[in-house]
């Protein structure tokens, strides 16, 4: 049974779901294609009415959607509410701005007239992860439905109730059947969907191994794809940083969503002058976190999403220590029901250690001490990933210089506030390619057509 709701707080099975049959999948794809033939001709105002209604429904039922996310993947309830509200903001953002983003652009050739116009590609296949079970869906749905595309979506096997709820949300908002379709399918069936000629584009958010497989399959079919994969973001603390401001962000940046965020702060690179004070304050703050039921407002440390995620993370920490890293804090499973792990700090991680290259998807922080700003930048760039990162300094001009030298898709100076629908999200290197959110996000799956007119004689 691939689709199972298991409560991470106590490990109990909530509900199971069967895979779609081949016949049901065929029907879903045919319905999506049929819907696209109508949806692509609907005006922006009509699309916006539906997408705005979905945003309104999300806001009206924040607690209902948040409770599902907490039950299925263990997100603390206040964070779950924040995710639902942000998802609503994304939908409303694209409802408001899609028409202007996709408006024809006038060009100025030497002769005649020309413009670029945007048109939807068709049915898109989206593969989405469990760690943000509504936000990840809103990112693709808001932009691409407003662009005139339709979506068939394979959500993660551990959040089927969230997946079903989001599909119902759009239907309740007035979306036609086939505009957004949740697919409870296997990996083998996913290959079949990518191969289907009715699918015109593929978007995946997930792990690097999943990205390799899905991108390769899309490439074999000559289909446009976007990949938002893992990250190992550097949190660079320079010698003039305001630690009173920096430390709370360090804790939030590593522990938000119990560390299960691709753009979380994961590698803490700190200059010598402030390293001891930073590490002492960071450790004290992590030790103060208290595990508990993520439905309880007072809980400050939630569970990991699954038993498998916990076991993998514990194995990574054990391997790091075996390879020579120092376990400064934590590193063990908590003795309680559910999938809880101690907040963990690793230090003394040499370049030959597997932990130097790995992504830790959970409450594990890697700490590095450096002497100079240049050394901090070099260490930040010595990574297979390039999703995000941050730099902390009292001198914003210095922060901008450092930010420009770090090889990532996103850099933040004295903050880690990536939650804005207007800000494009995505990375480079093994963190993937393409962008979601902002103006760039809606441009990924539209045909940018050149139209030129003019009366000129043919060349002789």
Image (cartoon, helix red, strand yellow):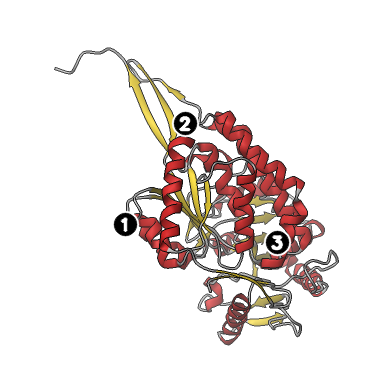
Q: Position of residue 340 (x, y in %)?
A: 71, 77
Q: Give coordinates of residue 68: x percent, y percent.
A: 70, 61
38 left or right, relative to 438: left
Q: Earlier in the sequence, mark 2 or mark 1?
A: 2
Question: Badge 2, how many Cα within 10 Å: few under 14, some, many 20+?
Answer: few
- The dot on residue 68 is 3
Task: For residue 459, say whether it is visible.
Answer: yes
Under circle 1, the secondary element is helix
Q: Which mark is residue 41?
A: 2
Which dot marks residue 131? none
Query: What is the x, y in percent for residue 434?
Result: 48, 49
Q: Are marks 2 and 1 in contact (CB under 8 Å)?
A: no
Q: Residues within 10 Å of mark 3 (few under 14, many from 20)?
A: many
Q: CA distance from mark 2 to mark 3?
A: 35 Å
Query: Is any atom of residue 341 visible in this view?
Result: no
Q: Is residue 193 left or right of residue 96?
A: left
Q: Position of residue 423 (x, y in %)?
A: 61, 44
Question: Considering only vertical position in the picture, is 293 above or below 140?
Answer: below
User: Which residue corresponds to the image point at 57% horizontal and 34% vertical from the top-left?
Assistant: 47
Label 1, label 3: how far apart the Cα atoms are: 37 Å
- At x 36% / y 60%, what residue is drawn? 217
| SS at mark 3 in the image | helix
x 70%, y 51%: residue: 417
Mark sitting earlier along the chain (1/3):
3
Residue at coordinates 45% horizontally, 62% vertically from top-left?
211
The label nearer to you, 2 versus 1, is 2
Q: CA distance from mark 2 to mark 1?
A: 30 Å
Residue corresponding to mark 1: 220
Between 131 and 235, the residue placed more toward the observer is 131
């Amino acid at each position: 049974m691939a689709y199972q709701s298991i409560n991470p707080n106590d490990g109990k099975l909530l509900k199971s779901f069967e895979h779609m049959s081949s016949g049901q999948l065929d029907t879903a794809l045919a319905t999506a294609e049929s819907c696209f033939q109508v949806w692509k001709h609907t005006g922006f105002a009509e699309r916006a009415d539906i997408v705005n209604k979905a945003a309104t429904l999300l806001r009206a039922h924040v607690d209902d959607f948040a409770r599902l996310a907490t039950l299925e993947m263990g997100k603390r309830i206040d964070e779950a509410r924040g995710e639902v509200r942000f998802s609503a903001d994304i939908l409303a953002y694209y409802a408001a701005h899609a028409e202007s983003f996709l408006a024809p652009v006038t060009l100025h050739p030497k002769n005649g007239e020309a413009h670029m116009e945007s048109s939807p590609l068709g049915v898109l296949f989206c593969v989405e992860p469990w760690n943000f079970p509504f936000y990840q869906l809103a990112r693709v749905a808001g932009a691409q439905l407003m662009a005139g595309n339709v979506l068939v979506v394979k959500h993660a096997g551990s959040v089927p109730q969230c997946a079903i709820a989001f599909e119902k949300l759009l239907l309740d908002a007035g979306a036609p059947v086939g505009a957004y379709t949740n697919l409870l399918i296997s990996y083998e069936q996913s290959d079949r969907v990518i191969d289907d000629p009715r699918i015109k584009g593929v978007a995946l958010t997930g792990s690097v191994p999943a990205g390799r497989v899905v991108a390769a399959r899309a490439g074999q079919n000559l289909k446009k794809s976007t990949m938002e994969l893992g990250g190992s973001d550097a949190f660079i603390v320079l010698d003039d940083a305001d630690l009173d401001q920096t430390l709370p962000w360090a804790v939030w940046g590593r522990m938000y969503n119990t560390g299960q965020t691709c753009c979380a702060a994961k590698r803490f690179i700190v200059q010598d002058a402030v390293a001891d004070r930073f590490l002492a304050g960071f450790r004290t703050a992590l030790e103060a976190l208290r595990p508990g039921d993520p439905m309880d407002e007072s809980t400050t440390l939630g569970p990991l999403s699954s038993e498998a995620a916990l076991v993998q993370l514990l194995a990574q920490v054990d391997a790091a220590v075996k390879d020579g890293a120092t376990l400064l804090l934590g590193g063990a499973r908590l003795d309680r029901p559910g999938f809880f792990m101690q907040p963990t700090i690793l230090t003394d991680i040499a370049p030959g250690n597997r932990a130097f290259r790995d992504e830790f998807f959970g409450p594990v922080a890697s700490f590095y001490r450096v002497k100079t700003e240049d050394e901090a930048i070099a260490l930040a760039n010595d990574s297979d990933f390039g999703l995000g990162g941050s730099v902390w300094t009292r001198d914003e001009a210095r922060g901008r210089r450092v930010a420009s030298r770090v090889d990532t898709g996103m850099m933040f100076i004295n903050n880690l506030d990536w939650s804005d629908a207007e800000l494009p999200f995505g990375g480079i290197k093994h963190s993937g390619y393409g962008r979601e959110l902002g103006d760039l996000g809606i441009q990924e799956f539209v045909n940018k057509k050149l139209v030129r007119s003019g009366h000129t004689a043919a060349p002789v």
